[in-house]
Structure formats: structure tokens, C-alpha cells
Image (cartoon, rainbow, N blue to C red):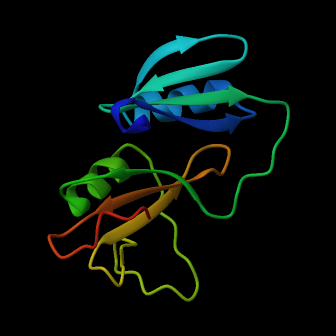
Amino acid sequence: MLEQYRVTAFLATTQPERARSFYRDLLGLSLEEESPFALVMKSANAKVRIQKVQKFTPFPFTVLGWEVEDMRSAIKELIGRGVRFERFDGIDQDDFGIWLSPSGAQVCWFKDPDNNLLSLTQFTSSSDARAGS
């Protein structure tokens, strides 16, 4: 039933000014709305509602990700804008921080100013059913 409707993702921030700059200026999302309660950012196919909160603990896993067509180009562009990619013990990542998943998808991670873990994924034709990263 819900497949016909647009998705809104939710995040939290204790630093709305830094979050606005990160998502708008570094990642290139459009600021659609700002209220005392949230920032609403827009991407090509979804909205991201970043709730302004007094405190929270970020989850230790990926909370938001983007599917990209050219992983290395996306990484280079984001590094050029000041994004730092994460490295994880026990995960075999290449020089760009890319992990090759069992399905063949390439995945890398970075954090926003509130330490929300974000990802980029490049699926290949052999990647299974575009499962989330």
C-alpha cells in the first residue's frame, strides 16, 4: 500500500546550525523548511527531517544512506567538500574506505556533525535485490 508514497527519513541533531550546513553545503541537499522543531532537507526522491533535540545518543549502525552510480567519484567529491570517511576494525576496506559486500555492492560510511552514521552504496548488476546497507 505505501509503495506509492514518498519516504521521509528522520534524524536528530543537537547542533542544528552545523547540521544545516553539513546537509545543505557539504552533501548538497536543499533546505525545504526550518522551524523551531526541525530542519527539512530534500533530496531527489526523499525528505530528511532532522529533528532539533536537546540530547540523544546516535545509533551505532547506519541510519541513512544514498545509492550512487559511481562510488569513487562520489567519495572524491565529498572528500573535496570536507567529508571524512570512516574505517572500521574487522571490515576489509580499500584505500577509499569502500567495503565490498557479499552481494557485490560497494559500501562506505561517514558521519554527520551529530555522529549519525551515513552511507553510500553502489550496487552492481549482481547485487541482490538492492537490500539496504
- Position of 78 compared to 86: left or right? left
- Position of 16 compared to 28: left or right? right
Q: Is residue 5 above or below residue 125?
A: above
Give 126 or 35, whichever is nearer the viewer: 126
Say which quarter of the image contains residue 100: bottom left
Residue, far front: 1
- Position of 14 compared to 99: left or right? right
Q: Is residue 94 above or below residue 52?
A: below
- Position of 133 compared to 10: left or right? left
Name the residue rendered at 46%, 18% in the picture. 31
Residue 29 x %, y %: 39, 29
Q: Is residue 42 above or below residue 58?
A: above
Residue 10 x %, y %: 60, 36
Residue, far right: 54
Name the residue rendered at 52%, 74% in the picture. 87
Residue 46 x %, y %: 40, 32
Query: Which quadrant of the figure contains the N terminus?
Result: top left
Name the residue rendered at 68%, 64% in the picture. 60
Name the residue rendered at 52%, 66% in the picture. 86
Residue, far left: 125
